[in-house]
Image (spheres, helix red, strand yellow):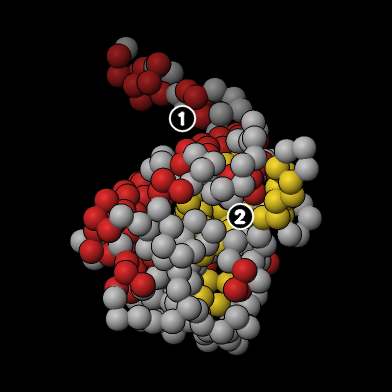
Amino acid sequence: MRRSCLVGGRGPHSKSFAQRIGPGRQGVTLIEVVVVIAIITLVLGLSLAAILRARMEGDRLKSMNNLRQINLAFHSYSSVHGDLPSIVDVMLPDYRDHPPFFAILPFLDHNRKIFISPADPSLTFMHPGKPFYPAPDPHDAYASYAYNALVFTGHARLDTISDGMSNTIGLGERYARCAEREWVVSIFSLQQSSGDGGSRRPSFADRYYGDVVPITTFASMPTTVPSVTGATFQTRPALLESDATVLQAPHPGGMLAGMMDGSVRTISRRISPSAFWSAVTPRGGEVNSDF
């Protein structure tokens, strides 16, 4: 009898595979495939977004550290020499009359990479058909940060910043290369051609280059506005739209600024022009409650 069950195909083990798994389960449906693909795509999208945010935050923190180190070098220079390194029109034998970033190299152990922002997109960009900026290594000369020309003109001292060092911007972010005017910002530049092409010193609010500058009027109280109505700084502009006359922030939240007291803060892209340029003047005498 046991033999007949096995041979005759009527035992429990004689069912076909299709019968065992039941009707409608012969394969995976199209809807199931689509759902799985959608879930995988969503997970990958969230993961990439998180990685991108983490990378941007890492770049921002590194830039903050760079600005702190540059600020510290300026204060160390001031402690040794009594004044700040100055902007001059001609090359003089004394290294103290070299550009400010060049002058503080002895206080940075000659670490030029500190002048490069990891978030600066212009250092990986080449304009089609315009092979400018031929430096073999951007770490040799380029600068992604700029010093306030109003602070570093002449042999200024920290104690002459009457607006208060915590209320005065000494350093800001800018693209190292300006595709619009074919400029490269170099720590070695003194005062090159103010036209298109060539190099310029890493400064902002610099009249020599036609930068936007603060204009202070004195009525009932000092009020400062930019020389170009509404101008402050650019936030993540396209490389071909970068304006060499103002600063550029490579971060979406605003621009990192090194204050003259050594602190670093983020300036919102929504800051009013008056508040921003009041913080640029070292001796304007404004009451800047919005900064």
The quarter of the rendered structure image containing the C terminus is top right
The quarter of the rendered structure image containing the N terminus is top left
Q: Residue at x 67, y 55 (%)?
A: 214
Contact (Cβ within 8 Å) of mark 2 with mark 1: no
Decide if residue 189 is on the left or right side of residue 283.
left
Q: Residue at x 30, y 19 (%)?
A: 3
Q: CA distance from mark 2 to mark 1?
A: 62 Å
| Disc nearer the start of the sequence (2/1) | 1
Residue 282 spot, x, y in % from top left = 54, 49
Q: Of the residues shown, which amino acid type is indicated by label 1?
A: Phe
Residue of label 2: 236
Q: Residue at x 41, y 62 (%)?
A: 155
Q: Is residue 20 above or below residue 251?
A: above
Residue 8 spot, x, y in % from top left = 41, 23
Whether residue 190 is visible:
yes
* Snapshot quadrant of residue 194: bottom right
Q: Which mark is drawn over residue 213?
A: none
Depth check: give the residue in front, 201 or 285. 285
Residue 2 spot, x, y in % from top left = 30, 14
Q: Which mark is drawn over residue 17?
A: 1
Mark 2 vs mark 1: give the one in front. Answer: 2
Around disc 2, counting alpha carbons within 10 Å, would you say few (fewer than 14), some (14 to 19), or many (20 or more)? many
Element carrying mark 1? helix
Decide if residue 259 is on the left or right side of residue 210.
left
Decide if residue 170 is on the left or right side of residue 76.
right
Residue 70 spot, x, y in % from top left = 35, 54
